[in-house]
Amino acid sequence: MGMPRKLKGFNLFHNGTNFVGQTTEITLPKLSRKMEDYQGGGMSGPIQIDFGQEAIQMEWTCGGFMPEVIAQYGITKHDGVLLRFAGGYQSEDRTTYDSIEIVVKGRHKEIDPGTAKTKDDTAFKITTVASYYKLSVNGQDLIEMDFINMVEKINGVDLLSGLRTALGL
């Protein structure tokens, strides 16, 4: 019987800058498929047709004002911001850690500098939308999605390879 893997520590890197000690919370990107009901003649019920990945975003909070983030606001390149989450997960029945890494390339959609109150804790919140996403566990790439280049690799299999060929890409 195994125990669940729990996050024991994490760090965030923003365009290569180490934000150790500055990031207080991260809402990791949700993976969700765009699905539509389809029921054709002769079918007794609908099935869900898969139209690909929904938009990906990462929300994160820092403990104070972040000029490095403000400097990236309004960046025009779809992948102008690089975020890398590195987390150490451990289950209570093992002494080793699993290294979970999430890489997101995109741009900041929203920057909420929070309230300004003397001698009060502050929260600087950022929402980053992604055109690229990669999830690796212990150095093995499990999911990689590159929207611009129509790449969707799941456990090493590129699900869009045939579609790219059909489109002449």
Image (tube, grey):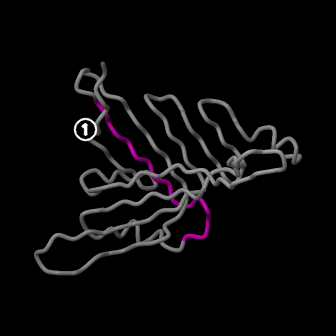
Q: Is residue 74 left or right of residue 25?
A: right
Q: Position of residue 93 (x, y in %)?
A: 24, 21
Q: Which residues are magenta?
A: 75-90
Q: Position of residue 139 (x, y in %)?
A: 47, 29
Image quarter where the N terminus lies is: top left
> Where, by quadrant of the figure, is residue 64 drawn?
bottom left
Q: Is residue 79 magenta?
A: yes
Callout 1: helix, strand or loop?
Answer: strand
Q: Position of residue 102 (x, y in %)?
A: 46, 44
> Where, by quadrant of the figure, is residue 7 drawn?
top left
Q: Is residue 48 left or right of residue 61?
A: right
Residue plotted at (66% across, 52% down): 147
Residue plotted at (45% across, 72% down): 110
Residue plotted at (49% across, 67% down): 108
Q: Is residue 96 left or right of residue 149?
A: left
Rendered position, 19 above or below 144:
below
Of all residues, the one furthest to the top in this rendering is 1
Pick the front one: 51 or 144: 51
Question: Total marks drawn?
Answer: 1
Of all residues, the one furthest to the left in this rendering is 119
Q: Is residue 166 magenta?
A: no
Rendered position, 124 above or below 155:
below
Main SS of the magenta segment? strand
Rendered position, 73 above or below 95:
below
Residue plotted at (64% across, 37% down): 153
Q: Which residue is mark 1?
A: 8
Q: Position of residue 158 (x, y in %)?
A: 70, 35
Q: Amino acid at mark 1?
A: Lys
Badge 1 crowding class, 10 Å Cα cut-off, few under 14, some 14 to 19, many 20 or more, is few
